[in-house]
Image (tube, helix red, strand yellow):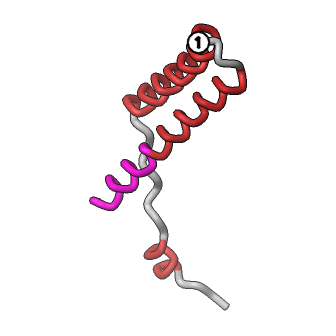
Amino acid sequence: MTVDRDVIAEHEHAPPDEVSTATMIAYAVAATLLVGWFLFGWLVLRQGFIDSVGEAAGAGFALLLVVSVVGTVRRSRR
């Protein structure tokens, strides 16, 4: 059984776009803010280690959800 290369070439997907430098900087800033939020809750507010981890993780997951929704909306417009 043989497969024509023309048929395969039609179904190949374009390579994914590279991540821009601005996006990488935004991710680094977001990570720094989340670590700062954790440290603020733990050391300044003295709310406990586990509570601070949970609060920072919750904020991080909410941020990931926002990034996912924005990315989906931008991709659907293409």
Q: Position of residue 70 (x, y in %)?
A: 36, 48
Residue denoted by label 1: 45
Magenta span has 61?
no
Q: In the orientation shown, which residue stands out farthest toward the bottom?
A: 1
User: Where does residue 48 sit, x and y in percent of width and height?
Assistant: 70, 19
Q: In the structure shown, which secondary structural element does the residue marked by tag 1 occupy?
A: loop
Q: 39 or 19, which lies in front?
A: 39
- Furthest toward the left, the residue is 77
> In this rendering, is residue 77 above or below 27?
below
Residue sitting nearer the eye, 52 or 73 = 52
Query: Viewer-proximal residue, 53 or 35?
Result: 53
Q: Furthest residue to the top?
A: 44
User: Residue at coordinates 47% horizontally, 74% vertically from top-left?
Assistant: 11
- Which residue shows up at 37% across the image and 29% down it? 22
The quarter of the displayed image where residue 24 is located: top left
Residue at the spot 64% in from the left edge and 23% down from the top edge: 52
Q: Which residues are magenta?
A: 66-78
